[in-house]
Amino acid sequence: MGCIRVDKITEYLCDPLQRCLKDDDPYVRKTAAVCVAKLYDINAELVEDRGFLESLKDLISDNNPMVVANAVAALAEIQEHSSRPIFEITSHTLSKLLTALNECTEWGQVFILDALSRCKAADAREAENIVERITPRLQHANCAVVLSAVKMILLQMELISSTDVVRNLCKKMAPPLVTLLSAEPEIQYVALRNINLIVQKRPTILAHEIKVFFCKYNDPIYVKMEKLEIMIKLASDRNIDQVLLEFKEYATEVDVDFVRRAVRAIGRCAIKLDRAAERCISVLLELIKIKVNYVVQEAIIVIKDIFRRYPNMYESIIATLCESLDTLDEPEAKASMIWIIGEYAERIDNADELLESFLESFPEEPPQVQLQLLTATVKLFLKKPTEGPQQMIQVVLNNATVETDNPDLRDRAYIYWRLLSTDPEAAKDVVLAEKPVISDDSNQLDPSLLDELLANIATLSSVYHKPPDAFVTRAKTASQRTEDDDYPDGNEKGYSANVGDGGASPSTSSSSVPYTAARQPSPAQVMPAPASPVPDLLGDLIGLDNNAIVPADQPAMPSGPPLPILLPASTGQGLQISAQLARQDGQIFYSLMFENNSQITLDGFMIQFNKNSFGLAAAGPLQVPPLAPGAAARTLLPMVLFQNMSPGPPSSLLQVAVKNNQQPVWYFNDKILLHVFFSEDGRMERTSFLEVRS
């Protein structure tokens, strides 16, 4: 009964639920605990008034561990949807949950551990006691239990002040995390994504286990990529030789994407570890000598970053890089090589010749290369103001200001031109200024975001590396939803359902595009609707069978511009409806276009508008003639304001229902265009203004 999400069912559910919560059979009690959470989502006020929350809290003291686990899961779910504290873990509750942890099933343990992770210990001693009780869960066979236990321990470690205790906990967490990498590739991937977060916060946990992250020949590519990231984070002066040997081997494999990532990993290790930079460059030079094109280009890209990290230290390798100049065909590799030539122009004898070879194809180069070529030529001119660079700078500035449509390139060229013509010394100070040293923080998360993700270990959040709010729209409970007597309110993204077959109708594209763009209908505008709430099937179908219906009357076929498609023929069993609010001669109309693409004649059209923020309702009958197969009809329906007001927060959503004698009721959404409320001349009488404002 709890799964039947209809308000009228709840009154029949309360009494049996009250009895089941106190039933002698623990199986009944644990099922009833879950039902309370379902009932809360339908009618939160009823759950609180009937005392179900108190009964649920009492179940935490139940002598059956599965009942306790389900009660905890239900309370945690209710707490997520409530703005006030409902599930508070006291020291007494904490003790009971830790006791139940040893006896309940693996998924019950996950529920309890996740609930306990939201509990903050009072002091370091209590945190140590909690961790001591949870540590045995690290040896569990279920990966979810292990990750939940790791999450709990990591959170409690923040309060533990003893370095010895923290060190011992780090040692205890390493083996279970390593064991997760022996599971199936899919589980490995989830574990690796979580481990990536853990090593950013506590790198010492797996500092001595880097070998387990070495890639195997049969690892899927997504596992290999994650292992590479973790190896970079765990790389240190002590293990860099092993790591570089692995990366060098990976750079000779057949998967191009993996090879590129491996070469970049070598460069990132060089940027991260000062003392290992020279060894990393040696490996990169060995890879360049292999003469594999994509390896060479990737190596040049990472060497450019190494030059930025260690300026004026390894320029002796530039000659080797210049040997591969003719093989470069990727924009990023070209731009990197041009940057190197421009940055070290005074140390490269033929720098002007090298840049001139790129200038020949300047108009055809991508913007990234053009921008870098412009800057490098200016650097060359400032460092070597001889006749050759002078001619080059004139050609480049002319191409970049006259022959290009790229505003970024043109603006930069004008800035350089103005600097060079006004004050060459100032140009030197700007263009040749000392640059900040870069660091390898491209894959490091912000500390606050990292803490949030660690609090969500073993969830999708820790796999996506995004906070939950970034990809989850939490459903509103009954207490948060606006009560509606007709059918549940949709959200701004749209709600439309075919009551006849239970299918969903696409919502209107005009809900997300401006008025001028919405006037041109096209298949691309038809967007699939998100999953919608279940309508109240026990009541009437939003009043479509009562006296509120506006019956069809005389036909009207006004002409006008195309309207946005709100109900496509593919969803409406051949009936296509296009509609939009319009204003004519000081009156608001709903302009509708009906097209019959079915094989039967459609007649008896009726329309109903749901409650809305502006109280829009039909002012007269809908005039649509019977539609033969292939026929179409267009009509204007007069509208009135303040007749059907919605008590909820303001919304631009207009929910419409249309039915005819041959088909089921069709629901679709439209967007209320605000300009239809404005008078054509922009004037309003004082009395009218006061009436509207009140």
Image (cartoon, rainbow, N blue to C red):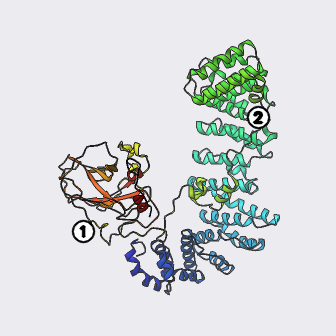
* Above or below, 180 relative to 79: above
Q: Nearer the viewer, residue 572 or 424?
A: 424
The image quadrant that residue 67 belongs to is: bottom right
Cα separation between marks 1 and 2:
76 Å
Q: Closer to the observer: label 1 or label 2? A: 1
Where does the image place residue 66, in percent across and percent down from the top left? 55, 77
Under circle 1, the secondary element is loop
Q: Say whether residue 358 is visible.
A: no
Residue 547 disc label: 1
Residue at the extreme top of the image, as rendered:
387
Q: Quadrant of the C terminus?
A: bottom left
Q: Quadrant of residue 281?
A: top right
**What amino acid is labelled 2 in the image?**
Lys
> In which quarter of the view is residue 661 placed?
bottom left
From the top left corner, tell me how far across and down residue 235 is, in percent. Answer: 75, 46
Per the image, label 2 sits on a secondary structure element best described as loop
Q: Is residue 680 visible?
A: yes
Q: Position of residue 270 (x, y in %)?
A: 75, 39
- Give amino acid for label 1: Asn
Q: Name the residue tied to disc 2.
A: 435
